[in-house]
Amino acid sequence: MLIKIGGFEFTAVWDGVLYKNLSNYPQITDWEKRNIIEFVEYEASHGRKCQIECEHADTLAEIHHALQNRQAYRNVPRPELLTECTACPVRKGCVTEFVCHTTSVENAVKILICGSLLSAINARKVSVEELMAESRNAAKDPADYFEYIMLAWGNCQAGDRLVMERKLGRFPDDQDLSADFTPGVRFYFRYEDLVKHPGRVFDGVLPMKIKDEIVLKDWLYAMVVPEALRGTIESLIPEELAGRVVYVENDCRDIWDWSEKVYRVIEKRDNYDLHN
């Protein structure tokens, strides 16, 4: 794997390259060093070596120093707001109190019937070779990526964007993400709770990912369902999750507005839980 350090729009892995955006490039924070260490170690655990490129020699030297002194960075606390991606018009960054997994209503139905979020290889019941060969694997993710449930920060719109992409069979345009936007179903988890999951892995890219399965009754903080999907979802909610489902009306301008509205609902619920 190649790691390119720079001033990108956001951090992402694509076709064997980690494009690592720094929040204040070429300056690098201890949290960002921790992420790079986690990425190198995750890749090594799957037999892949990493090469690091950076145009700024001082930054590259700092990274190599961190890699030689890994223990000093393993417990670097996560910031409350991460600004590697500042695309969100309101927050200008990723809020780190919650993580979430977003999926289509069809998949949400399967998840509720099963009672768990499952990795792609467990949910789809096809070989990893088939999963890797699908057109939806445009990023050319390696085999091990399909063993995990992927999670984003709670105010991120990337999950809904991916749901739209798979619905349309192409990358969504501005019209798709505004007037024609149809939100997915979000499963929210408190970071400090889910980090204790026995299958939790830090890969240096996502907030975390979970190997094989997340049992909803044990870990779910809240499930956010667009009001338009209430009729499809409501009868499937098991009793133990009934108090954790929130229906939200999509009266929003676009995907960004929806993501902010949903996260405010989660924050309001969290404030209520903390004071009652």
Image (cartoon, rainbow, N blue to C red):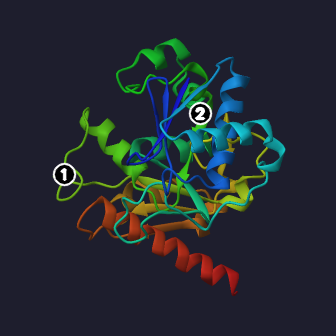
For numbered disc 1, what is the local secondary structure? loop
Q: Position of residue 158 (x, y in %)?
A: 41, 49
Name the front one of labels 2 and 1: 1
Which residue is drawn at the image coordinates 42% and 66% (left, top)?
Answer: 92
- Pick out the residue farthest to the right: 71
Residue 4 against residue 187 in the figure, above or below: above
Which residue is drawn at the image coordinates 78% and 52% (left, top)?
Answer: 196
Q: Is residue 242 visible?
A: yes
Give neighbour class at mark 1: few <14, some 14-19, many 20+ (Cα, 10 Å). Answer: few
Q: Earlier in the sequence, mark 2 or mark 1?
A: 2
Which residue is label 1 attached to? 174
Which residue is label 2 attached to? 119
For numbered disc 2, what is the local secondary structure? loop
Q: Is residue 242 left or right of residue 167?
A: right
Marks 2 and 1 in Cβ contact (< 8 Å): no
Give neighbour class at mark 2: few <14, some 14-19, many 20+ (Cα, 10 Å). Answer: many
